[in-house]
Amino acid sequence: MRPTEPAPGRRPAGPTRRETVDGIARELSAHGIETARTEAERLVAAALGLRKSALTLEGGVRLDPDEARVVARAVARRIGREPLQHIEGEAEFRELVLVSDRRALIPRPETEELVDRIAAWTRGEPVARALDVGVGSGVLALSLLVEGLADRVVGLDVSPDALEQARENAVRAGVAQRLELRRCGPDIWSAVGDDPPFDVVVSNPPYVRTGDLAGLAPEVRDHEPCVALDGGPDGLAVLRLLVAGAADALRPGGALFLEIGADQEVAVREALETASGWTDVSIGRDLAGRSRFASARVAEGVRPAG
């Protein structure tokens, strides 16, 4: 018996959406991607412009050839180890959905916990002015504004590309009028100038050792900005600048919140405890039990320089 041929003028039916997801999951798994099933679903949904729920409910719908080509291109990008968020064009962070591309770091779940620590410190009352050093895509600055933790934020970054992405995300979040973005130099603090003292300084700075960059996952090493990762020979170059200068930018009683590398607890604690002006030095752990956050407060009797 001969196989049925498609009617004249009709395209042959492609695989269903469900079959496509199954096949992509196997392919991703074969290339060492651990969360293959979840990523396959997200890739197909993004390529077809669908919500994941629609993909599940309409799994029996067949792909036409154009759709199949779009999906194939997305899969090829992921097999090439381009981050999933860059392929989707978006990344989620707490209440935010952000533009995501290679201009700035993809937000990490650990950084969401840093916002929780700032929220606990504010005790439900927004501070008047906050400073985000290394604003990147804007995740910290925008979270402070959207979640009512700060009335206004100044965001600094050395990268004009990152500032551009942060500006786009601020518009998307509806808080662009309350976020002031400035380009800074390697010294950071010259961009603050004669600003009035801030209530809080926050930063997720570069803290990867230069020698460790080559060993990072290809999604990070090859697709995220090196300037947002490279913390110098010991990973502490920017952290030292923050510890040394933040007290002068803060009001008495103001606080500094940092994300740090998991093996930097001793060095960061020592830096904070030996620098002038700091009290209530604390190192916190993330949900995985790793040292990940540092905080300190400016002693009440300390006045900002100038």
Image (spheres, helix red, strand yellow):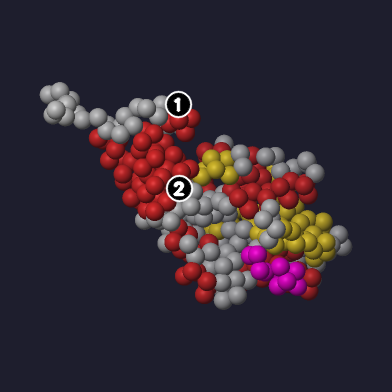
The answer to whether any part of residue 89 appears in the image is no
Q: Is residue 182 left or right of residue 47?
A: right
User: Can you tell which quarter of the image residue 57 is in?
Assistant: top left
- Secondary structure found at label 2: helix
Q: Return the x and y of residue 202 as percentages of the image width and height.
A: 67, 56
- Check disc 2: other Cα within 10 Å, few if <14, some if 14-19, many if 20+: many
Task: Give the residue number, with chain letter if any, for mark 1.
Answer: 57
**Relative to 112, does residue 277 appear above or below in the rendering?**
below
Residue 50 drawn at (x, y percent): 42, 32
In the image, 254 versus 106, the foreground residue is 106
Amino acid at circle 1 = Leu
Q: Which residue is found at the position 77% from the left and 47% from the top? A: 120
Residue topped by disc 2: 36
Quarter holding the C terminus is: bottom right
| Side of 294 where 97 appears, left or right | left
Q: Label 1's element?
A: helix
- Residue at the (51%, 55%) spot, across then down: 105
- Span of residues in magenta: 261-270
Q: CA distance from mark 1 to mark 2?
A: 20 Å
Front in this rendered view, residue 169 or 210: 210
Residue lying at 63% horizontally and 65% vertically, measured from the top left: 261
Residue type marked 2: Ala
